[in-house]
Image (cartoon, rainbow, N blue to C red):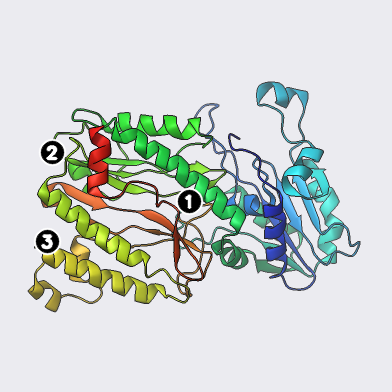
Amino acid sequence: MKYSSIDNTLFIENRNKFKNNLKPNSLAVFVSNDIMPTNADGAMGFRQNSDLFYLSGIDQEDTILVIFPDVKDGKHKEILFVKETSELIAIWEGAKLNKQQATAVSGIDHIYWFQEFDKIMKPFFFQAENIYLNANEHTRRYIDTETAEVRFNKSIISKYPLHKIERSAPIMHKIRAIKSTHEIDLIQQACDITEKGFRRLLSFIKPGVWEHEIEAELIHEFIRNRSQGFAYGPIVASGKNACVLHYVENNQQCKDGDVILLDVAAEYANYASDLTRCVPVNGKFTKRQKDVYNAVLRVHRAAAKLLLPGQTFEKYNVAVGNMMTEELLQLGLIKTEDVKKQNPAWPAYKKYFMHGTSHFMGLDVHDVGFFNEPMQAGMVFTVEPGIYIPEEGLGIRIENNLMITTTGQLDLMKNIPIETDEIEALMAK
């Protein structure tokens, strides 16, 4: 991995949080992700299961974590199974963690090889009354592939059919939503790397540059700062492309007079950041472009102030919708009559601002958490209002990452240029 080593205190604390939510005499198991194939003998890059990483810090395949607080021997409360390394693996892939290194990374003393799992674990499973299995319960999950986690769960249920099966996901959604100081530091590093990439672009963008060239500048800056790369598929959308919310082709030439919407951000140590900025191709916003940009910026700043402990998403979204309605009226994009006749289920403002304003962020860019529960201090959210006007070939979205504190918010991207005048001045250099 490219990132610097992480103090294993983070993972020890995370496991303790998880243990505090288990039923008595329960054993929980977490398994690593697959290395997914492409074609022939090719494979995609490895991305660890976020819950397993959160609880152990182990960032390689063929890993299983066991947590059993009430184990009868009083010793094997935490067990880690890792891939056995060899000279052959070391030559072809690079050596995997040995047992001492796995302990250093995770803070877990009892380490065994991955292939020993069934033999070592059988007596422990028979001691437990409940088995907690994990699953991807993200509300936006659309996965047809049978994952390693799904196969593993089927195997455990088949081998131990008389045990009570419990779900780990609700616990993980609860504890992962509240970020620790260690986690905020890692997210901040991702944000800082993103800032470096964005500033690099301001002197690079000009009429005639291609969207993919901008993408290349970013990946260069991200990787040279110890990131694995983009936290999600980068959106480099110039002109009318900015009105396609998930535009990822990045294959068009940027034209004089257009605005580029950049929804691009780095990850660091598996933690995401999520930035959106809009810049004029020629370095100067037109009056209309600036008016739309500033309208979005006002909504962005007003929405950010609403991220407070106790705030509900229902009230938050209504308030942001009302703000956006006022801005669209001022821009002449909707009329008072449109608002009076609007369908409450799809208000008039949705014609030009059709997506949500905020989502949880952390190990996953769309991180886990409960939208039906009040916001709490320690949660990290995006704030990303936008206005998209296809008939004008103009899309503006502005996005920062904020942590809720006991007294307000901490903007993790406060140093990234956001005002039109500042962007123009930096592009002029």
Task: Tell me which residue sits at (67%, 53%) in the image.
Answer: 10
Give the Cα distance between marks 3 and 1.
43 Å
Give the Cα distance between marks 3 and 2.
20 Å
The residue to which callout 3 is attached is 331
Please, what secondary structure does the residue beneath circle 1 have? loop
Q: Nearer the viewer, residue 26 or 122?
A: 26
Q: Is residue 291 above or below residue 220?
A: below
Please, what secondary structure does the residue beneath circle 3 have? loop
Locate residue 338, reporting x and y percent. 11, 72
* Between discs 3 and 2, the one toward the N terminus: 2
Q: Is residue 146 visible?
A: no
Task: Tell me which residue sits at (18%, 44%) in the image.
Answer: 240
Q: Is residue 374 visible?
A: yes
Locate residue 423, reporting x and y percent. 26, 43
Q: Amino acid at mark 2?
A: Gly
Locate residue 93, reporting x and y percent. 65, 26
Q: Amino acid at mark 3?
A: Leu
Q: In the rendered view, does 308 fall on the left or right side of 67?
A: left
The residue to which callout 1 is attached is 144
Q: Amino acid at mark 1?
A: Asp
Disc 2 crowd rating (10 Å Cα; few below 14, some 14-19, many 20+) is some
The residue to which callout 2 is attached is 257
Task: Tell me which residue sits at (21%, 50%) in the image.
Answer: 395
Q: Nearer the viewer, residue 415 or 26?
A: 415
